[in-house]
Image: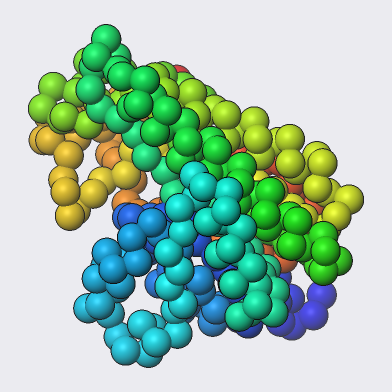
Amino acid sequence: MKKDYLKEMFNLEGKSVLITGAAGQIGRELCMVYFNCGAKVFAVDLDINRMKERFSELSDTLYSNVSFFEMDITKQDSVGKSFVDIFSESGGLDILINNAGVSTFEPFAERSEESFDFVMDVNMKGTFFCIQKYADELIKRKSKGVIINIASFYGVISPDLRIYTDCGRINSEVYGATKAGVIQMTRYFAANLANCGIRVNCISPGGIFNPEEPQGEDFIKGYSSLCPMGRMAKTEEIIGGILYLSSDAASYTTGHNMIIDGGMSCW
């Protein structure tokens, strides 16, 4: 074994990565982490001004070395144009992270068709459009690539609605259904893009504490009591799995759904 074996396996320096939903809690963290790993970062979100505001307090070096792109992942034309522009700027794209996702929180009896469609359009259709265009660009260039989809453990298990006593963000049936769909889409594309040199994997996080908009105290206690590790996740605890799947250390890993939930889905 070479002396620098581990360093080479996990090395992301010089790689290029596109991250959708870059203005969100996980997306922002991912942009900073990949930048610190020496990767060229393309931060993508629906509102470019909000995205830039989310990064404005960071160092000038990071801010000047992350490229911001406005893209509506629910619109095929918007996705197509953005990917063409990004490939033109970068000359290629090593990693796609489909992180953008939404939910809806009204009681299911009050769910409107528009609300249902909104979640379906972003979580399912948006993920599909990004995979479709990314794979098309790679195949045309005969290039290899990595796709990581961000799903949820609620694509595997159902939420316990009894813990939503002081939290207005009540998890919805359509959110779980779309995340289950993302997991299955991961398997489909892993099987069908392997011969093109494209690996496709998935991360399913459990509940993540949000320090900017904290969940209710009762919710946190209730959630923690259900979790074997006794607490919610920190954002950075989700990142390690994503970095692994995007590195050469995972060169023989495709079609995998990595659940990072403190053991919640073990019950």
Quadrant location of the N terminus in the rendered image: bottom right
- Toward which corner of the image does residue 117 lie, by quadrant? top left
Residue 20: x percent and y percent? 47, 57
How is colour applied across the structure in the image?
Answer: rainbow
Inspect this view and state whether residue 258 appears: no
> Residue 8 appears at what percent x and percent y?
70, 77
Furthest residue in direction bottom, as rendered = 61
Nearer-the-camera pick, 230 or 77: 77
Q: Outermost residue toward the front?
A: 77
Total labels drawn: 0
Which residue does the image show at 34% across and 34% down from the upper left?
103
- Quadrant of the image for the C terminus? top left
Q: Of 108 and 74, which appears nearest the observer?
A: 74
Q: Which residue is drawn at 45% across and 53% down?
A: 72
Q: Residue at x 74, y 62 (%)?
A: 137
Place of residue 131 in the rendered image (x, y in percent of width and height, measured from the top left) = 65, 49
Residue 249 relative to residue 224: left or right: right
Front residue of 162 and 19: 19
The relative height of residue 231 versus residue 3 in the rendered view (above or below) is: above
Image location of residue 151, percent across then percent down: 50, 39
Q: Is residue 244 depicted above or below 189 in this figure?
A: below
Image vertical order of residue 89 relative to residue 132, above or below: below
Would you say 109 lies left or right of 12 here?
left
Residue 24 makes an appearance in the image:
yes
Based on the displayed image, in which of its 4 quarters is residue 138 positioned?
bottom right
In the picture as drawn, the residue positioned furthest to the top comes out as 109
Q: Which residue is drawn at 32% across and 55% down?
A: 25
